[in-house]
């Protein structure tokens, strides 16, 4: 690194420490690196540009500066030479808003910037999927519905493709629970081979809203057995939310011959009808 990258918290710590002597030797001058709300760029074969990027992992000359909620203004020590910044998208895996990880399927943003004293330097956050990311499926329901395999055997409880007010297109997947059809367990038609997976990260992305709980899990072929297990319970939301479900531990095991994802829901006691909306499902790995 050509110089010290100083974040504001270091200055605050120094200001409250009696033995902080380096300020007497060298005046610290600060500029601001500003990063705004992120976007996901749409390209052929990656589906709708819906995302749940909540923060940014910021590096300077490959050294971590910090993790910042977006948008952010980050104090950086000004320098004569340009600084190379690497910015990576942070997401909350499995709906855990208290944690953040670098999403493995987005390219990092690399930019050279001059940080000048008292000046703001703005970097737009326009992320793209990595070229090597493999999409097993992209289910946006605009043309067809691949979630028609009824696991519970009740053909009356289906995930329907319907025209709706989805902000991502004209159609979405709809689960309606009422009357005798008060439960659903559904998966997609195709089964994907574990041999096509490099045994790295696997995520299921989807957008949802609704007034009922639902479960998401996997159906794994292991040897001659099919093993169904649910990983997570999703709670109701009146607004559309983007969800990142980490299925690495389930799907990337060496004994998995093939795999599917599965959704299920049951009408809660006291309710006469519930509706769940699903859209932009993407099953992604390397």
Image: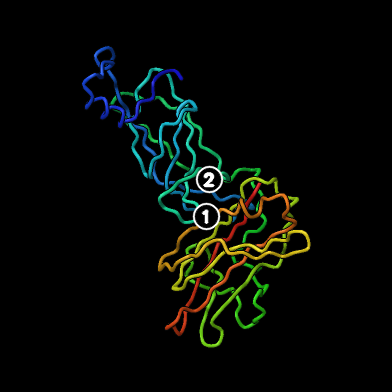
**Disc 2: which residue:** 103
Residues marked 2 and 1 touching at CB (< 8 Å): yes
Q: How is the image coloured?
A: rainbow
Q: Is residue 85 above or below residue 22?
A: below
Q: Is residue 25 left or right of residue 101?
A: left
User: What is the x, y in percent for residue 202?
Assistant: 61, 51
Q: Is residue 114 left or right of residue 101?
A: left
Decide which of tag 2 and tag 1 comes sooner along the chain. Answer: 2
**Disc 1: which residue:** 244
Q: Nearer the viewer, residue 7 or 167?
A: 7
- Residue 55 is labelled as none
Seen at 35% across and 22% down, the residue is: 78
Seen at 30% across and 31% down, the residue is: 8
Q: CA distance from mark 2 to mark 1?
A: 9 Å
Q: Splitting the image into 4 quarters, where does residue 219 fall? A: bottom right
User: What is the x, y in percent for residue 32?
Assistant: 33, 31
Q: Nearer the viewer, residue 68 or 17?
A: 17
Q: Residue furthest top?
A: 25
User: What is the x, y in percent for residue 87?
Assistant: 47, 36
Seen at 26% across and 16% down, the residue is: 21
């Amino acid at each position: 690194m050509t110089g010290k990258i100083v974040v504001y918290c270091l200055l605050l710590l120094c200001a409250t420490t009696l033995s902080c002597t380096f300020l007497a030797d060298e005046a610290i001058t600060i500029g601001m690196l500003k990063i705004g709300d992120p976007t996901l760029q749409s390209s052929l074969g990656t589906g709708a540009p819906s995302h749940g990027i909540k923060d940014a992992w910021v590096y300077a000359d490959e050294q971590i500066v910090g993790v910042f909620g977006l948008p952010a203004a980050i104090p950086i020590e000004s320098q004569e030479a340009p600084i190379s910044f690497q910015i990576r998208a942070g997401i909350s895996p499995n709906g855990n808003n208290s944690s953040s990880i670098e999403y493995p399927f987005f390219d990092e943003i690399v930019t050279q910037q001059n940080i000048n004293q008292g000046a703001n330097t703005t970097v737009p956050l326009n992320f793209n999927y990595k070229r090597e990311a493999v999409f097993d499926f992209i289910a946006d329901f605009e043309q067809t519905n691949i979630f028609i395999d009824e696991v519970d055997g009740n053909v009356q409880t289906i995930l329907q493709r319907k025209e709706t007010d989805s902000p991502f297109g004209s159609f979405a997947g709809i689960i309606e629970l009422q009357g005798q059809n008060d439960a659903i367990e559904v998966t997609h038609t195709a089964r994907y081979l574990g041999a096509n997976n490099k045994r790295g990260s696997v995520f299921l992305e989807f957008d949802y809203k609704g007034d009922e709980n639902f479960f998401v899990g996997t159906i794994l072929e292991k040897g001659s057995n099919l093993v169904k297990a649910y990983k997570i319970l999703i709670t109701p939301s009146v607004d559309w939310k983007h969800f990142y479900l980490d299925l690495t531990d389930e799907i990337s095991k060496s004994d998995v011959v093939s795999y599917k994802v599965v959704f299920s829901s049951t009408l809660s006691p006291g309710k006469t009808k519930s509706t769940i909306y699903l859209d932009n499902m993407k099953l992604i790995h390397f």
